[in-house]
Image (cartoon, rainbow, N blue to C red):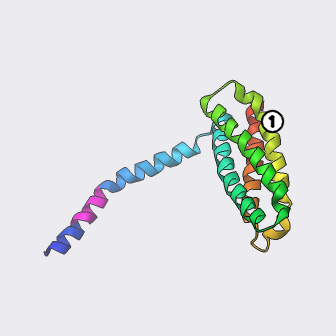
Amino acid sequence: MNRRNFMVTGVGLGMLAAGPALADKKQSGAAAKAQPQTPRDTLVATTSECVQKGALCSAHCAEELAKGNTSMAHCAESVEEMRALVQAMLTLAARGSAMAKKLAPVCAEACKSCADACLEHKAHWEHGMHLVCKSCMEACLACEKACSAYVAA
């Protein structure tokens, strides 16, 4: 057996030995995802995604405004208001603050407003344009729903 065959065999045996352990990790990861999340967990996840998608939308709006596309002004304004409130919501929810329940309805309203502003660009989506607005809208609607569920819990 030459050195290359020895190495390949050794790696193969190592993978066989590690296989059950890796399968257990995959199963435990799947089991962790399968467990029902609390409204707070859902809120933290959705606000985090909303902040990220909003940042991309904000950058897109800024680029379009710089090119002279003034139709993005309403979207740019709405996304910045939404990002400020959702970031605060994320911080409070992650900390388990009692103030989170008070902010959640305002956050939901900002998300709804932002989603409406993003929806103004729907006609462009089928042409592959302003798709970051679509992504932002979807994240905002999920965040709005999570805020409402959090208040109701």
Query: What span is colored magenta in the figure?
Result: 10-17
Q: Position of residue 132 (x, y in %)?
A: 72, 61
Q: Name the quadrant containing residue 17.
A: bottom left
9 vs 66, nearest the viewer: 66
Q: Is residue 120 above or below residue 82?
A: below
Q: Is residue 112 left or right of residue 51?
A: right
67 vs 11, nearest the viewer: 67
Q: Is residue 143 above or below residue 116?
A: above
Point 62% across, 39% down: residue: 36
Q: Position of residue 25 (x, y in %)?
A: 42, 48
Point 76% across, 68% down: residue: 67
Q: Position of residue 23 (x, y in %)?
A: 41, 53
Main SS category, magenta section: helix
Q: Is residue 153 above or below residue 30?
A: above
Residue at label 1?
106
Query: How many badges with numbers are in the image?
Result: 1
